[in-house]
Image (cartoon, rainbow, N blue to C red):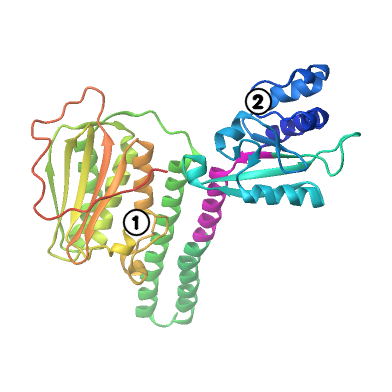
Amino acid sequence: MSPLVALVVGLVLGGVAVAAVILSRRRTFDGPAPDDVGGLPEAAFARRLLDLMDPAVVLVDVDDAILLANPSARALGIVRGSRLLVPELLGLVQAVRAGGSRRADVRLPGDLVGSGPRLMGVHGVRLHSGTAPLPGPVALVLQDVTETRRTEAVRRDFVANVGHELKTPVGALALLAEAIEQAADDPEAVQRFAGRIARESDRLARLVRELIDLSRLQGGEPLPELLPVEVDDVIAEAVDRTRTAAKAKDLEIAVGGHAGLVVRGVESQLVTAVTNLLANAVAYSEGENRIAVAARARSGFAEIAVTDSGVGIPRKDRQRVFERFYRVDQSRASSTGGTGLGLAIVKHVASNHGGSVAVWSEEGLGSTFTLRIPLAAGATEPLDAHPPKPAAPVEKMEIERS
């Protein structure tokens, strides 16, 4: 709960304490405050303020009956008539009566809220007045903390993963430096260790660079203005960046599809996304195979598909390949030189552009990653924008935007 909300809640609860005496005598479930509250301006003001508040507020009497519930509380579906429907909230009320103020996170089921499960931060306060019988009513203030808790969990996991990933190249550099020192009289060994140091340094530099890119894409910096971008230019630049690595493995990159497509976006980010898809295809393909990259217009989007005939992705891993630092085969991480961030960057580029990314894969047959970006306003689709469907069954998995 933000400091501003906490301050407002504190002021409101003070007013509710004054109103509690009258409300406990005449329970109100819907509509305006009762007429006899007019004699106490503080209570009427508190009720009005409660109705306007975004946090849900519920006032529970000594017998667990609802004295008051503002519109936000009713919208959550936690109140029916004069009763609370969530056992965890009733348990919190009892804990507040027994021991005073309490804070807890309570998960509301999706069928109750109507928009998926929500996690609510609940502050329970025991209210007393000079004439109210003990233990008195209890006020519950509920604030949706679903996204806040998710962000906190992501941040913790991110920091933990970064620490783990940085340990590997840093530790390797330390060991290699020690090995060079011990092999000072062996020029061949020194040269071999120096080459490994160069590779580990390059991996570390790439990891830091991709961490910075991912941080920017996740909201660390404002998204630049989206401008018309030629898809042909994006593909050409991405292929050029990947050609050297492909030639080193005797791989051919074939370019096809529709020409002249224009999307709205940030060209540098789109080039990075397509480059990452191509680099991923190169890393998991073997020699004398072909990697294809093609663009087409479909349903208002430009689809850029990168297809390889590599090892493929097991079914159990397909839903996780876009997670940060996730690798399908940990044993191949060092040989491919991947950081585990490339596909995560692709996902965030797609999301920031109002698009999506999907993957089709079959073990032993290869994979197809498809990046979908909205076409620029006024851009027209080619007449052959809807080619025949492939004969083989295609399984696509849309990746949820974040």
In this picture, is 196 found above or below 47? below
Q: Nearer the viewer, mark 2 or mark 1?
A: 2
How packed mark 1 is, by other alpha carbons closer than 10 Å (few <14, some 14-19, many 20 or more), is some
Amino acid type of the residue tagged 1 in the rendering: Gln
Residue 160 picture location, percent across and down: 54, 60
The answer to whether residue 169 is magenta is no
The answer to whether residue 152 is magenta is yes
What range of the chain is rendered magenta? 141-162
On residue 51, the disc is 2
Disc 1 element: loop
Q: Horizontal placement of 54 versus 43: left or right? A: left
Q: Residue at x 15, y 55 (%)?
A: 393
Q: Horizontal placement of 34 versus 340: left or right? A: right
Dominant secondary structure of the residues highlighted in magenta in the image: helix
Of all residues, the one furthest to the right in this rendering is 130
On residue 319, the disc is 1
Q: Earlier in the sequence, mark 2 or mark 1?
A: 2
Quarter the C terminus occupies = top left
Q: Nearer the viewer, residue 363 or 269?
A: 363
Disc 2 element: helix
Q: Nearer the viewer, residue 108 or 247?
A: 108
Q: Horizontal placement of 185 versus 303: left or right? A: right
In this picture, is 57 found above or below 281? above
